[in-house]
Each structure stands twice: as structure tokens, then as C-alpha cells.
Image: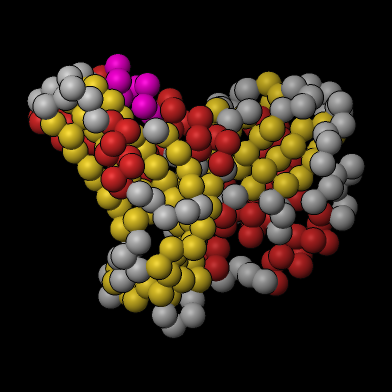
Amino acid sequence: MIQLTHAAIDPAALLESVSDNQAGAVLLFLGTVREFTAGEQTSHLNYTAYESMAQSSLLQLEQEAAEQYDIVRIGIVHRLGELSLGEVSVAIAVSSAHRATAYECSRWLIDTLKQRIPIWKQEHYTDGRVEWQHPGMDPNAVAGSLPGLNQAADALRSNLPKEQA
Amino acid sequence: MTAAADTVSILFFAAAADLVGAERLQLSLAGPLTLAELQQTLFREYPPLAAQAKFLMWAVNEQYAAAQTKLQAGDTIACIPPVSGG
């Protein structure tokens, strides 16, 4: 099961999807919505994705994991849309003959997913601030530019030949 | 929206969409064009996007692509700011 979903993730269904008599270990990782990050209080999150590419690159990730690790089955579900505190944003299940492989593969999957899959998290803080999470980028450079630059962009866009917004 | 035969679509996500003020643009290809040349055109039109250029990844038809990639009519190009799933 490799899936993007706007509905609540069902970890039991994901576990069921990787269960297999060849497996001696089944490992489940859940990423959940945390309330405090570096002293800032989150109210909720909003996840968005380049859905078609995210789906195909998750399948690619599954294939690469299967080539590197001696696993039996892999399941990955990522949630999109608005999430409340404590809700599950991502679930990864791995089954393998022995536990060491499941731990290694699960860790590789979540680390690589975070580096590569085109999904973005928008933090909504309790003080009303809204911030896209773009590791490495200065959030002020982006957040501080709005909305004035949007109007500038609109003006520029109207000058672009043969394009439609 | 149906893409005309001689155009490419450009998708923008998250903060990149905010910087450009659109999630999708359609541009006509005047002749052979590489991804790098398309990027330069976009950066000239959208200085706020240019300011973040070093952070951006680009995909052509749902695959991360190198700057020298040659674009074809009908291609979908995506401007991908640093990802933060998980």
C-alpha cells in the first residue's frame, strides 16, 4: 500500500497490508503533529503535495528499498490537508524475516522521504502566523514578501507572452 | 486547461507559488529551450523567485531534472522548493 490520502490514516490497515508468513518482524513508524517546535506553539498543520509526482516517487522509493534491503513488504501512507495536533501525518510499515532489516529499512524510508518526496508542510502557529516549511530557506524571505510582491507578480505576469495563470 | 501543442506548463508549489503569485503558468516555446533557459526567463520575470533560486529543485514530467535538460512541447515543468513531508 503506497498512498496519499486526505482522510485519517488507519495504521491497523497499513500493518495488515504488510503482514506475511515470511515475516518474523513487522515494524510501524508514525509521524505525528507536534505541538511545540523550538519553543513555538503549533495550532495545526496543512500538508500539500505535487500529488502525481509524490505518488510515483513513493513507488520509486519502495522499489529502491526493496533492492537495498531484504524486506518482505513495505507500506507507506502520507496524509494531506489540514491536521490537528497528535494526528498521524505519515505511516511507514515494513515487514522482514528478521528485525534488524526492518529497523534499517524503515529509517532509510522516512529519511529519504523527507529529502526527496514533493510534499510540503505549512505550520499554523497559535499566534496566527502561517509559515511554509522549506528546510534551508529563510522563512522571512518568503513570508515577509507577501502580499505586496503578489501584486507585483500579477503585474509582471500580465506582461508575459501567451501565458495563463 | 488543455495545453496548446507548442506550450509547456510550469507548476509552482508552496512558497514558490506564493513568490510567483500563481500555481501554474503556460508558456509557448519559440524554439529549442533548455530547463536552464526557462529558469532564467522565469527569474527575470519574477525577481522574488530568483532570490530563492539556489534552494529550488526542478522536475520535468515528474522526474527531477538537470539544468541542461531539453524541453519539448507538452512537457510539465515543476518548480520544487525544499520539501518538508513526513
Decide which of B47, A41 is in the foreground and name it.
A41
Q: Quadrant of the N terminus of chain A?
A: top left
| Residue B36 located left or right of residue A56 | right
Assess whether residue A138 is covered by the magenta stretch: no
Q: Residue at x 31, y 65 (%)?
A: A86
Residues A66 and A11: in front is A11
Q: Residue at x 33, y 42 (%)?
A: A13
| Position of residue A115 measured from the top left corner of the image (x, y, whole percent) | 38, 41
> What secondary structure prevails in the magenta region?
helix
Give percent across and percent down for residue A111: 29, 40
Residue drawn at (67%, 38%) of the image = B39
Tell me if residue B83 comes above or below residue B39 in the rendering: below
Residue reaching furthest bottom?
A: A127
Evaluate whether residue B84 shows in this view. Answer: no
Quadrant housing residue A3? top left
Q: Is residue A34 above or below residue A14?
A: below
